[in-house]
Image: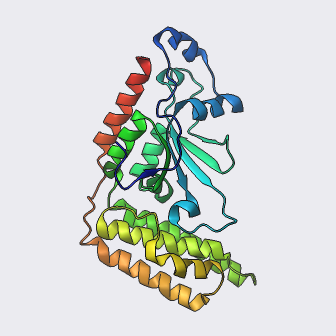
Amino acid sequence: MVPPSVRRAGSSPDVIESTRPDALRQAARVTISDDEGALGLVRDHTILAVVAGSRAYGLATDASDVDRRGVYAAPAPLFWRFAKPPTHVEGPLPEQFSWELERFCELALAANPTVLECLWSPLVEKATPEGEELLAVREAFLSRRAHQTFLRYADAQFRKLEGDLRNGGAPRWKHVMHMLRLLECGLHLVRHGEPRVHVGDRRERLLAVRRGEVGWDEIGAWRAALTADVNDALDRSPLPAEPDRAAVEDLLVSIRRRSLDR
């Protein structure tokens, strides 16, 4: 089942189209090099679809797009040819991006912040039985690796913003806001053992940053304090040293095998 903290944001069907036994040979001949074939994987084999970005964070404005992220499980026969299924696909909707299941798992095991947040989005548009299973093992992806990845992503963004200032321009305040939000999320993860996607009571202060109402010195001090808090929380973190790779791999293999039985 979808964890209690997650609610559905739509009425998408809960069952994906599968590969039937009598169609396996035909599926094995399919190539997915064309755009239509890749988009077909998203349409027909998505197991998890969520709303991400500002709407999931609680930071949306009237002008905010709807950012969608998803996971599709390509049928196993598509891996039997030299031309493998794509690791990711953009579309078919605007601002929609999906990963193939194996690639998604690799990134999540490496504590990629963008990918991990998909598993904790409060807005789930679609979760098939396989998607429910993926959500059920989401804690297996977590580890203390997140300490470095969240800090590294935020630091890279901060340096880009500093570069804008050095070159005589103004920082992109939306990016400043999301840099601080990422640090807040990383701190909650390291301190409490799971990401917090929705910003909660930090919303108004972060939106003030987006509007350019917070000075750069204050932003620098805020960033430094959050970075120090993340580092200080590491020693007492409930996160394991490494993710449960075996549990994730077992799920991946199980989903691949089941695609052969349909």
Q: Residue at x 66, y 83 (%)?
A: 212
- Residue 172 position, x and y percent, is 68, 75
The quadrant in which residue 116 appears is: bottom left
Q: Is residue 123 visible?
A: yes
- Residue 179 position, x and y percent, is 54, 72
Q: Is residue 235 above or below residue 77?
A: below
Q: Residue at x 55, y 48 (%)?
A: 69
Q: Residue at x 75, y 84 (%)?
A: 168
Which image quarter holds the N terminus?
top left
- Residue 257 position, x and y percent, is 38, 23
Residue 231 lies left or right of residue 57; in this view the side is left
The quadrant in which residue 200 appears is: bottom left
Residue 175 lies left or right of residue 117; in this view the side is right
Q: Nearer the viewer, residue 164 or 74?
A: 74
Determine the residue located farthest toward the right in the rendered image: 168
Q: Is residue 63 above or below residue 165?
A: above
Residue 228 lies left or right of residue 171; in this view the side is left
- Residue 227 position, x and y percent, is 42, 78
Q: Is residue 160 visible?
A: no
Determine the residue located farthest toward the front in the rendered image: 11
Q: Is residue 137 above or below residue 212?
A: above
Q: Is residue 47 above or below residue 112?
A: above
Which image quarter holds the C terminus?
top left
Q: Residue at x 50, y 25 (%)?
A: 75
